[in-house]
Amino acid sequence: NAGVTQTPKFQVLKTGQSMTLQCAQDMNHNSMYWYRQDPGMGLRLIYYSASEGTTDKGEVPNGYNVSRLNKREFSLRLESAAPSQTSVYFCASTRGGDSSNEQFFGPGTRLTVL
Amino acid sequence: GQSLEQPSEVTAVEGAIVQINCTYQTSGFYGLSWYQQHDGGAPTFLSYNALDGLEETGRFSSFLSRSDSYGYLLLQELQMKDSASYFCAVRISGSARQLTFGSGTQLTVLP
């Protein structure tokens, strides 16, 4: 069981470039999330997917798009990167059902936009 | 929207007890979670309270008062490895179980 995996671990982009951050989980979880964390800050929700086939905006969705490719995979796309998007990006998942509240996090992608 | 307040830093010595407080303002409150994060790594789940009262898990306990919109994380018998950032997070009602996180409390444990 790898849990939640993210690729790449590090990325440097120039302003205006695009890229896709990949996330996959092997725990058969229903819900998946993308967060960003800026230095000294908490995690802010970008987008989430309650279940396969659905996605919704979180607190800070501007400049991002997502795709829930299947139950395992949830990708985050930056169409035209900006320096303000320099951050650490975490993907997370949770099983769902009222008994489960734990979110499992991936190791993060450290993105720098020049 | 939601807002959470927690202290930015706490320092304690090994073997001591420390309490990290969290106050929140939110609509549709469902529960309060706590996560630990070491050196910018992946956050890991510590506890969840949906009902008033104390939940104990080993050296860690978490408390919730829904009427006061307040909770805390209690760490006992502190160890050096407990030095980390601790985040409270509110879960609002909804099928996606999305969380809103506080800004985090950096705990430093001194020898």
Image: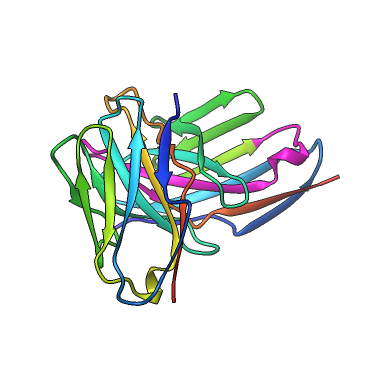
The image position of residue B101, as x and y in percent, is: 42, 51
Q: Position of residue B102 (x, y in %)?
A: 46, 54
- Relative placement, left or right, of B14 versus A46 is right
In the visual, does B104 lie left or right of B14?
left
Q: Is residue A65 above or below residue B14?
A: below
Q: Nearer the viewer, residue B42 or B3?
A: B42
Q: What number of labels is visible? A: 0
| Quadrant, the N terminus of chain A | top left
Q: Residue furthest right?
A: B111
Say if the magenta span includes residue A29. no
Q: Which corner quadrant of the image does residue B111 belong to?
A: top right
Q: Specify whether residue B97 is in view.
A: no
- Determine whether A13 is above or below A66 in the image: below
Q: Is residue B110 left or right of residue A43?
A: right
Q: Position of residue B9 (x, y in %)?
A: 65, 57
- Residue A100: in sight, yes or no? yes
Quadrant in which the C terminus of chain A is drawn:
bottom left
Tell me which residue sits at (45%, 29%) in the image: A2
- Measured as percent of width and height from the top left, residue A8 is found at 43, 51
Q: Which of the two residues, B53 or B36, is positioned nearer the viewer here? A: B36
Task: Say left or right for A39 vs A114.
Answer: right
Q: Please report the residue visible at 77 percent of the width from the left and 40 percent of the height from the top.
A: B80
Work out which residue is located at the far left of the displayed protein and give it.
Answer: A53
| Most foreground residue, B90 or A34 | A34
Q: Which residues are magenta?
A: B75-100
